[in-house]
Image: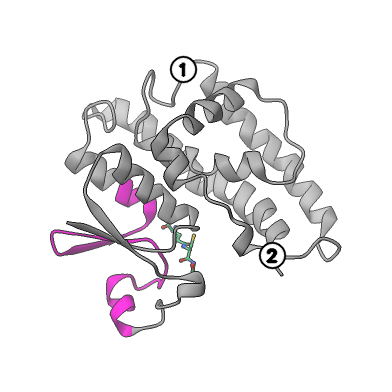
Amino acid sequence: MITVWGRATSSNVQTVMWALAELDLPHERIDAGGPFGGLDTPEFAAMNPNRLVPVLRDGGEYLWESASIVRYLGARYGSEQFWPSDPLKRAKLDQWSDWTKTTLVPAFITNVFKLIISKRPGERDEAAIRKGVAELANVMRIFDERLSEAAYLGGDEPCFADIVAGVLLYRYFTLEIERADLPHLEAYYERLTRRPTYARHVMISYDSMRAK
Ligand SMILES: N[C@@H](CCC(=O)N[C@@H](CS)C(=O)NCC(=O)O)C(=O)O
């Protein structure tokens, strides 16, 4: 049985949970982090020295970093379409997974999402948010362009890279920001929301994370 440590409201935990559901793998999830705490214990540090969620245990081995976990699950349990064995095909998807972590996460989560949810309205740095939203539009345009060529990042069906990148779109499309007109990205998000696995593990309110 696979075990995941992490609260359901963490987008990085959602990445792993969505992948487990797409791959139809039996698993259990133990709440940790946020209001549940538990990251400051020596036992947790032994599982992940960064003291962050998610952590996944499979066959007695522990893994951290959500994108690496999804790649592991794909390599071990995924179909050819979910995690292609051809090195070039896979590298073209790794691009999007790495791009998410190195480009999209800073542009959206760090420079927009956190600035909004960590402060109450009236206490926010509106100038920084405006700048973040303008820069985010350029990043999202890159995502939209790829999706003008195919239904999913790898073609007709979702693969591991869609999970790493697509998980952020629930927050992107529900946050109180102005969004650029990106029809391919919107259609892609609509497709994701129709997947029961996405609805169950990703479309989870983040209101409890907002500054009170
Ligand atoms: N790059 C890591 C980031 C992990 C991370 O930042 N996790 C956050 C939640 S999204 C965390 O553990 N925060 C402390 C907490 O929830 O208490 C990953 O993708 O797994």
- For image coordinates 37% across by 44% down, the residue present is 18
**Displayed quadrant of residue 81:** top left
Q: Secondary structure at mark 1?
A: loop
Residue farthest toward the bottom in the current orientation of the protein: 42
The residue segment tinted magenta is: 42-70
Q: Amino acid at mark 2?
A: Ser
**Displayed quadrant of residue 133:** top right
Distance between mark 2 and mark 1 Cα atoms:
36 Å
Specify few, some or many for label 1: CA neighbours under 10 Å numbering under 14, 14-19, or 20 or more.
some
Whether residue 108 is in magenta: the answer is: no
Q: Is residue 85 visible?
A: yes
Q: Nearer the viewer, residue 181 or 171?
A: 171
Give the labeled residue for mark 1.
Answer: 150
Q: Amino acid at mark 1?
A: Ala
Q: Secondary structure at mark 2?
A: loop
Model colouring: one colour
Mark 2 against mark 1, which lies toward the viewer? Answer: 2
Give the labeled residue for mark 2.
Answer: 118
